[in-house]
Amino acid sequence: MIAAKLIADRAILVRAMAESVPSPCVSVCRMDADRILCEGCWRTIDEIRLWSSCSDAEKKAVWSLIEQRVAATTP
């Protein structure tokens, strides 16, 4: 789960940012078998679709959800 570790590490860095929150996209745009989360960035379709119109606070909230998802699925 190297990819999960990398995205989790990025999530920690994003918490410290005040603005210009980066996208979690890592150009691995493929949905999981249940079609719930992207296997690359761990976002839902709606989170991906709405990203560009989100405020920095909303983007940080998505990053927090990503961090929780990764933590829940990795040992």
Image (cartoon, grey):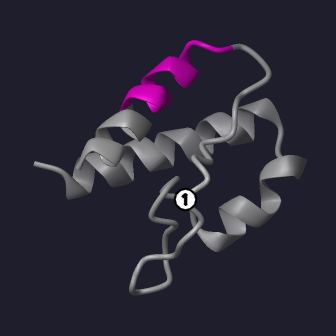
**Residue 73: % across, % down:** 23, 58
Q: Is residue 43 above or below residue 5?
A: below
Report the residue that reaches farthest toward the front: 27
Q: Is residue 58 above or below residue 40?
A: above
Please name the residue shown 72% across and 13% down the image: 18
Mark 1 closeness class: few <14, some 14–19, many ≥20 residues within 10 Å: few
Q: Is residue 69 above or below residue 67?
A: below
**Along the viewing direction, whichever of 13 and 27 lies nearer the viewer:** 27
Stretch of the chain drawn in magenta: 9-17
Please name the residue shown 43% across and 39% down the image: 7
**Along the viewing direction, whichever of 73 and 38 lies nearer the viewer:** 38
**Magenta span contains residue 12:** yes
Q: Is residue 3 above or below residue 11?
A: below
**Along the viewing direction, whichever of 7 and 44 lies nearer the viewer:** 7
**Residue 6: % across, % down:** 38, 35
Element type at marker 1?
loop
Report the residue that reaches farthest toward the right: 53
Residue 34 placement, left or right of 31: left
* Residue designated by label 1: 28
